């Protein structure tokens, strides 16, 4: 069972996928499939690829998928063990890539590698990224020098996230819109923040340019 805040994240991403008419989706850092299993109920989506670095999480997801469908997920779903920072040209051109509460698990110095893999190599028409909003942490009882999860490598406030997404979009030929989501507060924003990138240019600029 998901928490109310996570439920809001999932629904927000689903609304974006529906609005963009996505037929093929990459779930990068899919974990045990909180999003992926929901996407199976979306009749428009024809292909879903889930990638995760945890074999255990993928095994649990496979078992979960078997219980949800009488004959397994079939050709609509492919699960791959690997890192979302790997450049996988075989999956270039998907309609949408989703990174749901995953980028904060990557060392900040490797975010440029993630950027190249997702925005330069995979280059989906739409990229959706959600990540915790550090400004909201006091409302969750989290001390200023702590993160929400021991595996988080960073947690950004809204200004930092907005600056990063705008830089990624500019370097790679996308436009981006950021928004608060999950338990919005008038001062601290949402528990999470979301960046939605839409591809507008055929050729990316060199990262660092």
Image (tube, rainbow, N blue to C red):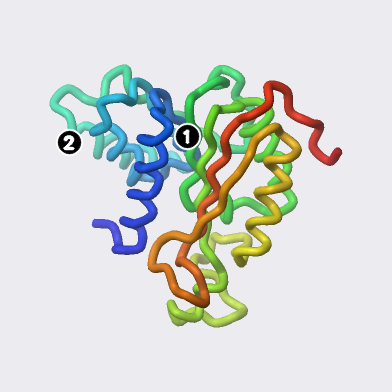
User: How far across and down, in percent of the image, does residue 145 sit?
Assistant: 62, 79
On the image, the x and y values in percent for residue 106 come to: 62, 51
> What secondary structure is found at the residue carrying circle 2?
helix
Q: Residue 67 carries which label?
A: 2
Dot 1: few (<14), some (14–19), or many (≥20) neighbours within 10 Å?
many
**Which is nearer the eye, 145 or 80?**
145
In the depicted structure, whether residue 159 falls above or below residue 105: below
The picture quadrant where one finds residue 158 is bottom right
Determine whether the residue tagged by mark 1 lies in a helix, strand or loop.
Answer: strand
Q: Would you place residue 51 above or below residue 137 in this image?
A: above
Q: Mark 1 points at which residue?
A: 51
Q: Given the current orientation, which residue lies at the most extreme left position?
A: 70
Viewer-closest of 161 and 72:
161
- Between marks 1 and 2, how big is the CA–CA gap? 20 Å
Q: Callout 2 environment at 10 Å: few (<14), some (14 to 19), or many (20+)?
A: few
Q: In which quarter of the image is the N terminus?
A: bottom left
Left or right of residue 128, residue 208 in this image:
right
Quadrant containing the C terminus is: top right
Residue 194, position as x, y percentages in the image: 51, 53
Q: In which quarter of the image is residue 37?
A: top left
What's the mark number on residue 81?
Answer: none
Query: Could you say where residue 206 lies in the image, as x and y percent from the top left?
Result: 81, 32
> Which label's residue is closer to the chain start, 1 or 2?
1
């Amino acid at each position: 069972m998901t928490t109310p805040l996570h439920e809001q994240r999932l629904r927000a991403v689903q609304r974006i996928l529906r609005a963009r008419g996505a037929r093929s989706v990459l779930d990068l850092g899919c974990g045990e499939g909180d999003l992926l299993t929901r996407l199976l109920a979306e009749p428009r989506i024809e292909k879903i690829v889930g990638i995760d670095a945890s074999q255990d999480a993928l095994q649990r997801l496979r078992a979960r998928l078997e219980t949800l469908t009488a004959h397994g997920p079939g050709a609509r779903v492919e699960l791959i063990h690997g890192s979302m920072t790997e450049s996988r040209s075989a999956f270039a051109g998907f309609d949408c890539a989703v990174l749901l509460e995953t980028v904060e698990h990557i060392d900040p110095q490797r975010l440029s590698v993630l950027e190249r893999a997702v925005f330069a190599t995979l280059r989906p028409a739409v990229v959706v990224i959600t990540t915790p909003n550090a400004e909201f942490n006091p409302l969750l009882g989290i001390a200023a020098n702590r993160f929400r999860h021991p595996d988080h490598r960073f947690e950004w406030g809204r200004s930092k996230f907005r600056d990063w997404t705008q830089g990624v979009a500019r370097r790679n030929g996308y436009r981006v819109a950021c928004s608060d989501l999950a338990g919005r507060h008038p001062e601290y924003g949402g528990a999470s923040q979301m960046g939605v990138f839409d591809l507008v240019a055929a050729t990316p600029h060199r990262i660092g340019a």
